[in-house]
Image: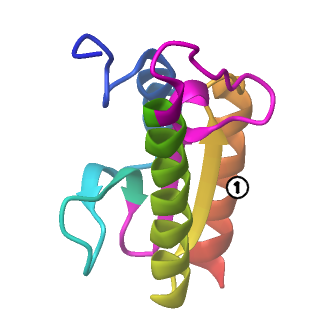
Amino acid sequence: MSRQASKDTAVELAVRRMLHRSGLRYRVEYPVPGMPRRRIDVAFPRVKVAVLIDGCFWHGCPVHATNPKANADWWRTKLQRNMARDRETTEHLVAAGWTVLRFWEHEAPEDVAARVAMTVRQSRQG
């Protein structure tokens, strides 16, 4: 598991490149305000837009999640804690006035970048 990328995954890099190319500037691995040791993958702090790209295995994707057979109880607990932490982080950010956009790693980077760009531009206008 130590070889698993926790940041700068291929999907994150692709989305960030597309956002940058479209003229948007953002912060990477931005700390979640008021929650130590939690990070936002791509943040637009001025307009309070948080983009989180979740791995299908680690965050329980309803389409691609799998349940390991070896040490099943430990893994089930671990993955449930991850999903609970995701909900808690989202709720905390929303309560602080942030717009939270969550995507799965299997989503097309073009679609993700387009949705993020639209949300950021709308937040800047209103």
Question: Looking at the image, is 46 positioned above or below residue 96?
Answer: above
65 over 74 or under it: above or below:
above
Q: Is residue 2 left or right of residue 75?
A: left
Please say if 43 is above or below 122: above
Q: Residue 94 appears at what percent x and percent y? A: 55, 81
Binning the other alpha carbons within 10 Å of mark 1 as few (below 14), some (14 to 19) or many (20 upward) gives few
> Is residue 118 within the magenta segment?
no
The relative height of residue 79 versus residue 99 in the rendered view (above or below) is above
Which contiguous range is marked in magenta?
44-73
Q: Quadrant of the N terminus?
A: top left
- The residue under the point 45% across, 60% down is 85
Residue linked to disc 1: 118
65 relative to 52 in the view: left or right: right
Q: Which sits in the foreground, 3 or 80?
A: 80
Helix, strand or loop at mark 1: helix
Q: Give the quadrant of the C terminus.
A: bottom right
| 71 part of magenta stretch | yes
